[in-house]
Image (tube, rainbow, N blue to C red):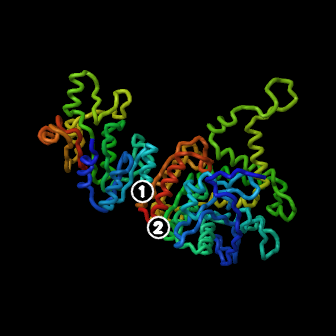
């Protein structure tokens, strides 16, 4: 998946000079970009030593912290935007992480792979095995993605928890996804990008 | 003796005694009209004097941080991290390492002569705070004509100085690197220090701290103090791995004349005896007190966020997983306060079984984090970023 397609809406929803916390920031590419183009004061949380080294080399603030052990060390509303890209499905309790993100940030941006995408459905239906696709490259036994969910599941969760959807955007790179992702997102969006607030 | 000096060593080094001929007002109110500092430097100061790193030593450290003294086969205490191509890269940085006042490796301290009495200071050496070391280091900075450190770097008590620098002289450093440190000691830390001090004072040779005048030294007490300290610097795990229950002499079979001695006993006794020959007991008392009293945010209404609000530099904070003397949680508190204060900070919790001593020892991940951070600092100085 082309990360640029996912990151470009993120850029549009972050304000210049704001405080940004990126949960699971990886090698710091997104934060480095936001620092450069929007002059944000950004911090990334990460546990992978190699990624942490890469962030440090880029001059991105990175803090070693396991998201599954909680975020109590961050005060309410201490950030303008809390971002989590492609990691919610790897959290032990995604709904609680979501609550925490909305407690710490005035706004949140979340991106996740849509497990309702037709390729995943076809894989499971026709082969009878858990999907291994370009975006979901792991086998069922070694995947860090322990909570698969669809676009519709996420919509339901937001409704149930009274979370406001400020914006959403769907990403699909190729035919027919590119053409149909907005018509029938649950089937054609490979990735969903959400902008949320309380 | 002949010694193969590794290529990435700064090589043979020697110390310089610098006279700081300016009054130093200590936190306790005493003024030292002048003082002397033992200093080593590695690398070359650039034309605009912007590439200087200040090394802050911990409890028992000295100015000899890297390279070899003529005739020695052991390098300086932070040699793993200072040298050409090492994280504190002497091809790019000018590294300044000093022995702080109150210590005992040639700088003004309890073993120096008190000019007012003509006798060694001994136990009468004035009480010191970390800020006094910082102030003395600032005078040394003037001596070199340096306006701003590229970074102030330290582990343990050294990290406390690096933080204090950031609050006291916000515009005189670009980066503060705080390793295996804490904003204040825990009750347990203070307890260990007090046991160590009591051990020293209980030695009959201590003579109320005036042992030098009696041509003696409380070596047994100091050795005991060091043995206690040493246990707290290692992890249980590492001690088990390194020594286990192996015997140095004797055996468990009954009837053996030779008493059983475990490897760990022999090791600790050796370390204690060696230290008590190298270090001064009054310095040990003085500097452990300095550690106990250190409290970063006391004069900032006990609010670390308010304290760090005064800083103007970027921070790197590093801790080690098995360090129970300065546990990772202490470093996380520093990091959290820095984030809340809106300062640039990165934090790495390095996996290690070497306890508090890990900050001195080779560790690939620690080397990479420190190296990447400082390499970027050097890039910025050289105009590459």
The C terminus of chain B: image quadrant = bottom left
Q: Which residue is mark 2?
A: B310
Query: Is residue A178 visible in this depiction of the protein?
Result: yes
Q: Does B282 sit left or right of B348 as displayed?
A: right
Mark 2 to mark 1: distance in Å? 22 Å
> Callout 2: helix, strand or loop?
loop
Q: Does A181 sit left or right of B75 as displayed?
A: left
Crowd around label 1: few <14 · some 14–19 · many ≥20 (10 Å): many
> Callout 1: helix, strand or loop?
loop
Instruction: Report the chain holding disc 1.
Output: A
Q: Which residue is mark 1?
A: A59
Q: Does B279 sit left or right of A95 as displayed?
A: right
Q: Mark 2 and 1 residues: CB-CB less than 8 Å, in contact?
A: no
Front residue of B315 and B283: B315
Percent across and percent down for residue B140 are 62, 71
Crowd around label 2: few <14 · some 14–19 · many ≥20 (10 Å): some
Q: Does B200 sit left or right of A61 as displayed?
A: right
Percent across and percent down for residue B306 are 45, 64
Q: How many marks?
A: 2
B104 vs A67: above or below:
below
Give the residue at x 58% y 75%.
Answer: B145
Query: Is residue B306 visible in this depiction of the protein?
Result: no
B339 vs A188: above or below:
below
Q: Do the residues marked 2 and 1 share a common chain?
A: no
Front residue of A136 and B184: A136
Give the residue at x 58% y 62%.
Answer: B161
């Amino acid at each position: 998946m082309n990360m640029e397609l996912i990151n470009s809406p993120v850029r549009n929803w972050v304000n210049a000079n704001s405080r940004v916390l990126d949960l699971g920031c990886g090698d710091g590419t997104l934060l480095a970009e936001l620092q450069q183009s929007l002059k944000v004061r950004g911090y990334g949380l990460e546990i992978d030593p190699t990624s942490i080294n890469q962030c440090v080399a880029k001059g991105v603030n990175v803090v070693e912290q396991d998201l599954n052990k909680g975020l109590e060390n961050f005060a309410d509303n201490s950030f303008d935007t809390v971002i989590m890209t492609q990691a919610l499905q790897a959290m032990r309790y995604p709904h609680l992480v979501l609550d925490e993100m909305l407690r710490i940030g005035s706004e949140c941006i979340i991106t996740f792979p849509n497990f309702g995408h037709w390729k995943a459905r076809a894989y499971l239906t026709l082969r009878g095995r858990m999907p291994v696709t370009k975006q979901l490259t792991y086998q069922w036994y070694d995947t860090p993605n322990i909570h698969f969910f669809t676009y519709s599941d996420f919509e339901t969760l937001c409704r149930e928890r009274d979370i406001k959807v400020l914006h959403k955007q769907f990403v699909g790179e190729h035919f027919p996804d590119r053409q149909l992702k907005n018509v029938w997102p649950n089937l054609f969006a490979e990735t969903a990008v959400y902008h949320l607030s309380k | 003796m002949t010694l193969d000096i590794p290529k990435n060593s700064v090589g043979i080094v020697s110390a310089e005694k610098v006279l700081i001929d300016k009054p130093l007002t200590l936190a306790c109110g005493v003024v030292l009209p002048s003082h002397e500092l033992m200093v080593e430097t590695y690398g070359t100061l650039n034309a605009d004097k912007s590439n200087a790193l200040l090394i802050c030593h911990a409890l028992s450290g000295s100015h000899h941080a890297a390279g070899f003294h003529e005739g020695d086969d052991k390098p300086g205490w932070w040699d793993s991290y200072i040298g050409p191509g090492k994280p504190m890269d002497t091809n790019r940085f000018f590294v300044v390492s000093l022995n702080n006042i109150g210590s005992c490796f040639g700088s003004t301290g309890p073993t120096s002569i008190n000019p007012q009495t003509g006798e060694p200071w001994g136990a009468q050496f004035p009480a010191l705070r970390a800020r006094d070391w910082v102030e003395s280091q600032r005078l040394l900075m003037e001596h070199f004509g340096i306006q701003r450190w590229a970074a102030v770097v330290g582990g343990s008590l050294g990290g406390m100085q690096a933080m204090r620098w950031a609050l006291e002289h916000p515009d005189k450093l670009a980066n503060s690197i705080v390793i295996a440190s804490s904003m204040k000691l825990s009750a347990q830390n203070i307890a260990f220090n007090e046991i160590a001090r009591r051990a020293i004072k209980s030695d009959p040779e201590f003579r109320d701290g005036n042992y030098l005048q009696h041509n003696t030294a409380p070596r047994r007490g100091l050795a005991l103090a060091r043995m206690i300290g040493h246990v707290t610097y290692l992890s249980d795990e590492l001690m088990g791995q390194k020594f286990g229950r192996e015997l140095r002499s004797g055996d468990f079979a009954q009837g053996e004349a030779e008493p059983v001695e475990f490897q760990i006993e022999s090791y600790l006794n050796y370390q204690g005896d060696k230290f008590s020959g190298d270090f001064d007991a009054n310095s040990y008392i003085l500097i452990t007190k300095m550690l106990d009293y250190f409290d970063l945010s006391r004069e900032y209404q006990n609010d670390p966020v308010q304290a760090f609000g005064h800083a103007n530099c970027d921070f790197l904070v590093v801790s080690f997983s098995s360090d129970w003397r300065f546990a990772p949680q202490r470093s996380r508190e520093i990091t959290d306060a820095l984030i809340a204060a809106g300062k640039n900070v990165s934090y790495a919790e390095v996996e290690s079984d070497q306890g508090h001593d890990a900050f001195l020892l080779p560790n690939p991940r620690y080397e990479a984090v420190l190296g990447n951070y400082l390499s970027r600092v050097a890039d910025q100085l050289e105009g590459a970023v």
